[in-house]
């Protein structure tokens, strides 16, 4: 089954879908040709998101400080938050549809090196491409340091693609999604192609053996977002595509929370990613099995016994 579909931030959608083996899909239709310039709808969305970002900054949201004296953390908070984020997912199959409903999940992470590349729609301006490419490169290097796992930005042979698409391009992205994640289900494609404006971005990751080992991922980010919101999506979707698939209203300070308070990876988030890739945890563990190890790792993060 494919999928970690997660939708994050009040406007960022991280669709975390982890699943099993590939399923047959019909031949992909030919993609619609991209127009020479963004449509009126795309331009209107860009204005809308600019207003959203300005309002959020006025309210003190999209923080970049990683947490401070107003957001104290300790081993108990780390242990609790990690369990909420790493052992649950946001989307659940209900009949033939995917519904945003939290459900229990096994621990997911990558065992092979993660090779991240950016892919831009034809309508994305060159200056924005350069900015976003640099953001992804810097974040990949940071994630490699934090996790100790091989994570790198690449120009070819990627297994984690970050797509920056306009509204029109995302609506016809099915063939591209099938190319990057063989076996992706139509339900997952539908969620991506039908995002409403309250969802800024989304990630889908593939666990083809249904054993907790991720092998491919695609993050889709709206090109209409202004710089701060786009960077928030880069941080949240790539981090979730590494295996921290859920969001929680109790996660603070964290980007894994729909309240938009933090727009960058926080200290707590870094600690959770480090725990996720600790060799004492293994893909496929359930929360109960992992609980003793999670408690030890959380204690060690705050100077406890090793």
Image: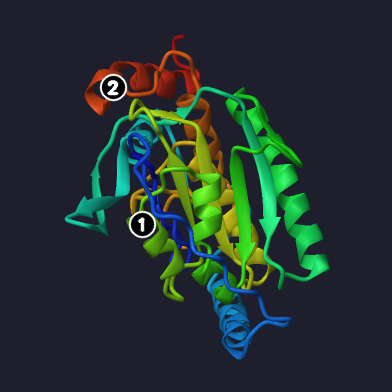
- In the displayed structure, would residue 237 be above or below residue 277? below
- In the displayed structure, would residue 44 be above or below residue 134? below
Cα separation between marks 1 and 2: 35 Å
**Which residue is outermost to the left?**
95
Q: Quadrant of residue 19?
A: top left
Q: Residue at coordinates 47% horizontally, 33% vertically from top-left?
A: 272
Q: Can residue 68 be seen at all in this image of the molecule?
A: no
Earlier-in-chain disc, 1 versus 2: 1
Q: Which mark is residue 291?
A: 2
Left or right of 101? Residue 234 is: right
Q: Please tell me which residue lies in front, 188 or 234.
A: 188
Q: Residue at coordinates 39% horizontally, 18% vertically from top-left?
A: 282
**Residue 268 location, x and y as percent?**
50, 39
Q: Residue at coordinates 56% horizontally, 84% vertically from top-left?
A: 48
**Which residue is outermost to the top?**
306
Q: Can residue 98 be seen at all in this image of the molecule?
A: yes
**Residue 114 location, x and y as percent?**
61, 32
Q: Residues within 10 Å of mark 2 (few under 14, many from 20)?
A: some
Left or right of 250? Residue 141 is: right
**Residue 191 location, x and y as percent?**
38, 63
Secondary structure at numbered mark 2: helix
Q: Quadrant of residue 165?
A: bottom right
Q: Residue at coordinates 29% horizontally, 16% vertically from top-left?
A: 292
**Which residue is outermost to the bottom?**
40
**Residue 263 location, x and y as percent?**
57, 57
Q: Please tell me which residue lies in front, 179 or 211.
A: 179
Q: Which mark is residue 44?
A: none
What residue is pinned by disc 1? Answer: 186
């Amino acid at each position: 089954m494919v999928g970690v579909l997660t939708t994050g931030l009040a406007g960022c959608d991280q669709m975390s879908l982890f699943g099993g083996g590939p399923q047959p899909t019909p031949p992909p239709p030919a993609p619609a040709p991209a127009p020479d310039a963004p449509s009126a709808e795309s331009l209107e969305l860009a204005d809308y998101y600019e207003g959203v970002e300005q309002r959020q900054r006025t309210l003190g949201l999209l923080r970049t400080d990683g947490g401070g004296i107003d957001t104290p953390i300790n081993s108990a908070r780390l242990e609790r938050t990690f369990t909420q984020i790493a052992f649950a997912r946001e989307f659940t199959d209900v009949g033939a549809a995917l519904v945003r409903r939290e459900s229990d999940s096994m621990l997911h992470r990558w065992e092979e090196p993660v090779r991240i590349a950016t892919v831009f729609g034809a309508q994305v301006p060159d200056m924005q491409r350069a900015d976003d490419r640099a953001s992804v490169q810097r974040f990949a290097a940071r994630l490699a340091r934090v996790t100790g796992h091989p994570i790198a930005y690449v120009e070819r042979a990627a297994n984690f693609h970050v797509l920056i698409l306009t509204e029109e391009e995302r609506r016809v992205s099915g063939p591209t999604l099938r190319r990057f994640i063989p076996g992706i289900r139509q339900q997952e494609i539908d969620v991506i192609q039908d995002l409403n404006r309250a969802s800024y971005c989304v990630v889908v990751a593939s666990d083809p053996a249904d054993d907790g080992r991720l092998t491919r991922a695609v993050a889709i980010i709206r090109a209409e977002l202004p710089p701060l919101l786009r960077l928030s999506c880069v941080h949240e979707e790539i981090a979730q595509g590494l295996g921290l698939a859920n969001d929680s209203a109790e996660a603070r300070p964290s980007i894994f929370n729909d309240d938009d308070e933090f727009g960058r990876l926080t200290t707590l988030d870094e600690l959770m990613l480090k725990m996720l890739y600790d060799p004492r945890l293994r893909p496929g563990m359930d929360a109960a099995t992992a609980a003793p190890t999670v408690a030890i790792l959380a204690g060690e993060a705050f100077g406890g016994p090793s």
